[in-house]
Image (cartoon, grey):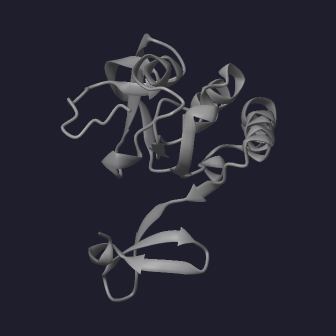
């Protein structure tokens, strides 16, 4: 079993291929930056970007883990989850994953873009998840009315972050 207790830091984007890519920086909220100019929230500016090397998550998992390892994958990659999970599903590497947590950002794209580029990918991903009996657990961090950070496990199960062990 592979156990990474002190993982090295990578200054790379998670993607569906190895490439040099542009990450467009939100001028409103820096952690909402994205690979997609089509993403229509947080004021993405096409002139404000950083070029960075990407890793192919499918290859990374395949080359560093086995199906006997217990993999918890958490993705919050501002729209890139569709392409990354689509490739994981196509290549069979999604079957390595035991727990899948993340955020979908479908509401951040124009309707025409969703229909042409994202909807069929999400359908394919969910069909593969059903086949693998693997659920996609929604993960969001929000502020409530008392200014406490809360972790949304699903629509009915909220837990303060400081209670997580």
- Residue 137, position as x, y percentages in the image: 58, 58
Work out whether residue 1 or residue 107 is closer to the camera in this orientation and state it.
1
- Residue 14, position as x, y percentages in the image: 43, 28
Quadrant location, the C terminus: bottom left
Q: Taking 85 as reference, is 70 left or right?
A: left
Q: Taking 76 as reference, is 164 left or right?
A: left
Number of disc labels: 0
Quadrant hosting residue 93: top right
The answer to whether residue 39 of the structure is visible from this angle is no
Q: Taking 133 as reference, is 48 left or right?
A: left
Quadrant location, the N terminus: top left
Q: Is the residue 66 above or below the residue 28 in the image?
A: above
- Residue 164, position as x, y percentages in the image: 32, 71
Which residue shows up at 61% across the image and 75% down it? 155
Work out whether residue 155 or residue 143 is closer to the camera in this orientation and state it.
155
Which residue shows up at 64% across the image and 44% down it? 109
């Amino acid at each position: 079993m592979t156990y990474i207790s002190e993982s090295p830091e990578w200054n790379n984007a998670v993607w569906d291929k190895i490439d040099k890519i542009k990450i467009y920086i939100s001028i409103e909220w820096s952690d909402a930056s994205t690979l997609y100019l089509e993403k229509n929230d947080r004021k993405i500016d096409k002139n404000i970007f950083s070029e960075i090397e990407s890793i192919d998550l499918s290859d990374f998992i395949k080359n560093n883990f086995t199906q006997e390892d217990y993999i918890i994958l958490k993705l919050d990659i501002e729209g890139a989850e569709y392409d990354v999970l689509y490739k994981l599903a196509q290549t069979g590497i999604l079957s390595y994953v035991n727990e899948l947590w993340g955020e979908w950002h479908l509401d951040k794209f124009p309707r025409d873009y969703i229909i042409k580029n994202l909807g069929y990918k999400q359908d394919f991903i969910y069909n593969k998840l059903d086949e693998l009996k693997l659920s996609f657990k929604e993960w969001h961090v929000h502020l409530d009315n008392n200014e406490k950070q809360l972790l949304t496990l699903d629509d009915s199960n909220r837990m303060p972050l400081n209670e997580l062990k």
